[in-house]
């Protein structure tokens, strides 16, 4: 298995249990995430499941999710 780092093909991350939000677009346009050993999180584009994955630390994901909950990124998308 290749080193799990940013840009690794998502399909090469062995044992990844990819999941997406229940709020995902019904057409499948969404991001999917998988927990990795050691607490990192892999993120991929559901439209390109074999494409590159981005790898984030637990702390990075915690900061992102809290920021999303706080509305820090609302100006980037139409949250209606």
Image (cartoon, rainbow, N blue to C red):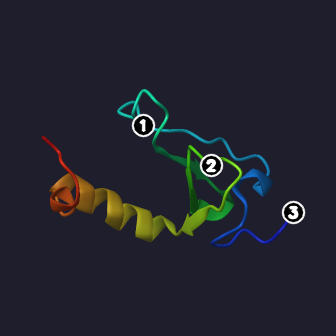
Q: Give the number of the disc on residue 1.
A: 3
* Residue appearing at x 67%, y 57% in the figure: 51
Q: Residue at x 17, y 56 (%)?
A: 74
Which residue is found at the position 46% from the left and 40% from the top? Answer: 29
Q: Please name which of the two marks, 1 or 2, marks the residue nearer to the observer.
A: 2
Q: Residues within 10 Å of mark 3 (few under 14, many from 20)?
A: few
Determine the residue located farthest toward the top in the rendered image: 26
Residue at 66% in and 70% down: 7
Q: Which residue is mark 2?
A: 48
Q: Residues within 10 Å of mark 1 (few under 14, many from 20)?
A: few
Q: Residue furthest right?
A: 1
Q: What number is the disc on residue 21? A: 1
User: Quadrant location of the N terminus?
Assistant: bottom right
Nearer-N-terminus badge (1/2)? 1
Q: Quadrant of the C terminus?
A: top left
Cα separation, mark 2 vs mark 3, equals: 20 Å
Q: Residue furthest left?
A: 80
Position of residue 10 relative to residue 64, above or below, is above
């Amino acid at each position: 298995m290749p080193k799990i780092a940013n840009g690794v093909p998502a399909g090469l991350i062995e044992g990844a249990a990819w999941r997406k939000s229940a709020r995902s677009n019904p057409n499948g346009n969404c991001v999917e995430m998988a927990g990795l050993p050691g607490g990192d999180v892999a993120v991929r584009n559901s439209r390109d499941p074999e494409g590159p994955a981005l790898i984030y630390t637990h702390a990075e994901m915690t900061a992102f999710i809290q920021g999303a909950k706080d509305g820090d990124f609302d100006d980037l998308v139409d949250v209606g």
